[in-house]
Image (spheres, rainbow, N blue to C red):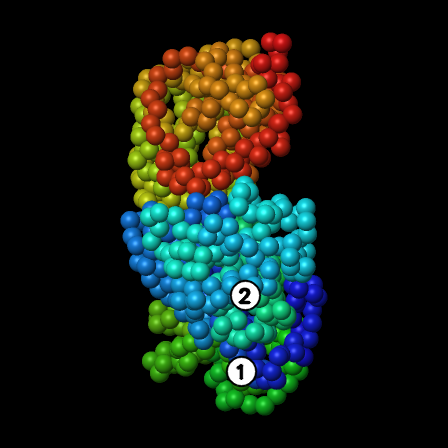
Amino acid sequence: MLQLYNTLTRRKEPFAPLEPGKASIYSCGPTVYRDVHIGNLRTYLLADWLRRLLEARGFAVTHVKNITDVGHMRQEMLDRGEDKVIAAALAAGKTPQQIVKEYTKSFLRDEAALDIKPADVFPRATDHIPQMIEMTQELLKRGLAYEVEGNVYFSVERFSGYGKLSGNVEASLLEGVRAEMDPRKRDPRDFALWKATEPGRVMKWPSPWGEGFPGWHIECSAMSTFHLGPTFDIHTGGVDNIFPHHEDELAQSEGALGHQVVRYWMHGQHLLVDGLKMAKSTGNTYTLPDLQSRGFEPPAFRYLCAATHYRRRLNFTFDSLRAATFALNRLRQEAFLAAQSPDSEGGEEWESAFWDAMEDDLHLPRALAIVWRMMRSETPPGAKARLLRSFDEVLMFGLFAPPTEVPAPVRALVDERQELRRRATFADADGLRERIDAAGFHVRDTRNDPAVVPAPAPPPAKAVGLHSSKDIPSWLEKPDELDFSLILNGRDDLDGLRRGVEAALRHAGDHKIEVIVVDNGSSDGTSEWLEELAARDERVRAIRCDHNLGVGAARNCGLRQARGRYVVLLDSSVELTGDLLSPLAEALEDGPAGIVGAFGVNTEDLRDFEDAPGPEVDAVEGYLMAFRRECVREVGLMDEKFRFYRHLDLDYSFAFREHGYRNRIVPDLPLRRHAHSDWERTPEEERDRLSKRNFYRFLKKHGDRTDLLLASAKK
Ligand code: AMP
Ligand code: ZN
C-alpha cells in the first residue's frame, strides 16, 4: 500500500486517489530566466520517481509541470513591476521571449539527460492569462480580494484557512513577508494577484482592471485546476515553495473554488553546498552541464539523489558524486553479469521488499540497499536480471545500457588468457589482460570461470579542487618561515587578479614573501594562468577551490596556509605601486597593532560608517588588511558566513578589537585603486540584498559593542 508524507497533514498517509486507478500530479517547474541547477533537478527527480512508481503500480498518471515565463518576482522587484524573466532579458540585451525560449530548451535538455519523463503538459504562464484573470475575478466576487488602482490583492484575513499548509500564522507570517509594505495593501500579508503595468513594460495584458500582469502564485492555481480539474491528487515542489508560494496557491484555489483542491502536498528537501541551499542568489550553483564537463554522467547524479531520502537535505560534493559513479558502475557490471543468464523465476522476497521500500514514502535509499543485497545473494542470476529490469523502470539508472554481451574478439582474448593461466604463463596472461582492458572490458578471476564485465571509464580521479576551507591543512601553529604572506582571491576576475598579483610580485623588494592566490572556482582561465605563473615563480602558490566557497572561506584558505610573520590581505582591485611592505611591517611592530591598512572607517553606532583618515580607526577596509599572523591564532579565522565581501572587513576588524587590539591606517601607502570587480558585476538588486544580509549578520554579532568604539573612548 503506497504511503506518502503529506505536508498538509504532517504525516504519512495511504495514497487513495480521487479516481481509482488514476493519479494526477502537478509539479512546480522552472522559472525560465536561467539554467536550472542541480538543486532544482533534485526536486524534479522526486516528481519523476513518484510518477514512475505510480505507473509501475498500475496507475494511469497525468503529470503537469508548469513553466514560469512571467511574473515570478521577489517582492521588491514586484513593487517596481519587474520580474526575473524581464530582468534577465534586460541584462542580456534580449527580449523576454528569447530568454524564455533559450532556457526552456536547456531545461528540457537537462531533464532528458537525466531520464526524467517529460510531463504530459508543460503549461506556460503566458498562455493562461485568461484563466488567471477569471480566477482573480472569482476571488473578487467572493470578497477574498480587493482592487486598488489597477492592482488586485488577495485578502489573507478573509480566508480562514490561511497558514494551514506552512503552519505560518500571524507573527511568523510577517517574517516571511520580506518586503517593505506596499502602501496599497490593507494587510502586509496580502499578496498580489494582478499588478498594474508601469510605462515601458513589454510583458503586459489587458484585464478588467486595466493593463497589467499576473502575480506569481496565481499561475499555479489557474494552471493546475485548468489542466487537472477542480480537485487533483498530488502537488510537488521544493520545501522553499511551501511558504509563501504554496500557502498562497492553496488560499487562491480553495478561495475561488470553495473546496479542497490539492489532496497530497509533497515537498523535497534542498540540495546544499557547504551547508547552504544551492541557489543562484547565493552564487553556489552547479548545472548538469557543469557536472558533465567535469566528466560525470547524469545517471550518477540520479544515483546520488536516490541514496538520500527526499525529505532529507543532501549536501552535494564532488567526492560523493564520484562515489556514486563507482557504485553505479559496479551495479551496472552486476546487472550485465546477471543478464548473461536467461530470465528465470525466483527472488520474490526481494521483489516485495523493494516495492515495500518504494511505497514507504519513496524510500529510495532502502530500496537501493535491497537491490545490493539481492545482487550479493544466492538468488539465480536470471531472476536477479528479471527483477532488476523491472526495478530500473522506476530507478532509471540505465542498468542495462550497452554493451549487453561480451563481443566475440574479447571473448577470444579471455579464453586465450585462461589457457595461458592454466599453463602457468602468467606474464603472457597479464599482457592479454591489458588488451582486454583496452577493449573496455575487465576480467574478474573467480573460483569458476572468469567473469567478464564492461569497464566504463572511471570518474575524474583527482579532486578537482577544495570543497571547503577545511580541506586544506592549517599551518597556523607552524613557526614563521617568511616575512610576508600576501593573500589574494578572485573568481572569474582574471584581469584584476593578474594585475594585483603581478604588482605585488614586482614591488616585493628584498622581503621574503609568498603570494597565495585563491582561485575561488573560476571558469575564465584563471586556474590555467595561475598554474603557469606558479610554475614560473616559486613565490606564488595557487589554491584552487572547486566552486565558489564565498569570500570569507577563500580568505581562510589563504590564512590557513600562510607562513609569513605578517599577513597582507589584498583585494584584487588594489595595485601596489611601490614598496608598501616596509611601512606595513613598521606599523605592525608598533604597540599592540591589530589590523593596519590603507583605508579606514569610524562609526558612532555600528550602523553608519564614515571614511576616517586615522591614524587609529574603528575598522580597516578590505582593500588592504595587514596583521601579524600570530594574531590569527588568538582572534581566529574569518567568518565564512560572509560569502559576499561587504562587512567582512568590518567583522574581522571588530573581532580584533574584541581581543584588545587597535586598528590603524598607514598614510600615503603606494597603491592605486581600481573598480571593485565583485561590486561591479553584481546586479544592483543583488548587491542590496547581499549587503543587507551581511550587515545584519554584522549587527547581530557586534551591534551592542559601542564600548569598543573610538567615539566612546573620547567621551
Ligand atoms: P525556482 O526556479 O527557483 O522556482 O525553483 C524550481 C524548483 O526547484 C522549486 O520547486 C524549488 O522549490 C526547487 N528548488 C530550488 N532550489 C532548490 C535546492 N537547492 N534544492 C532542491 N530544490 C530546489
Ligand atoms: Zn508553483
> Which mark is in front, 2 or 1?
2
The count of marks equals 2
Structural crowding at the residue carrying mark 1, measured as other residues with C-alpha within 10 Å and reported as few (<14), some (14–19) or many (≥20) = some
Viewer-side residue, 75 vs 193: 193
Question: Camera-side residue: 555 or 704?
Answer: 704
Where disc 1 sits, the SS reads: strand
Which amino acid does the dot numbered 1 rest on? Ala
Indicate whether 173 appears above or below 367. above
Which amino acid, mark 2?
Answer: Glu
- Residue 473 image offset from top left, x and y in percent: 53, 38
Asked if marks 2 and 1 touch (Cβ < 8 Å), the reply is: no
Left/right of residue 346 with respect to residue 287 in the rendered view: right
Q: Residue at x 51, y 69 (%)?
A: 224
Residue 680 is left or right of residue 452, and the answer is: left
Q: In the drawing, what numbered circle is on residue 60? A: 1
Determine whether the residue tagged by mark 2 lies in a helix, strand or loop: helix
Quadrant (top left, top right, bottom left, bottom right) of the C terminus: top right
Quarter placement of the N terminus: bottom right
Give coordinates of residue 681: x percent, y percent. 37, 39
Q: CA distance from mark 2 to mark 1?
A: 32 Å
Q: Is residue 412 left or right of residue 708?
A: left
Residue 361 vs residue 699, the one in the foreground? 699
Q: Residue at x 52, y 10 (%)?
A: 590
Residue 674, located in which quarter of the rendered image?
Answer: top left
First in residue order: circle 2 vs circle 1 = 1
**Does the beta carbon at disc 1 come under 8 Å from ligand 2?**
no
Vertical placement of 74 versus 551: above or below? below
The reply to whether residue 582 is in sight is yes
Q: Which residue matches tag 2?
A: 138
- Farthest residue in the left direction? 93
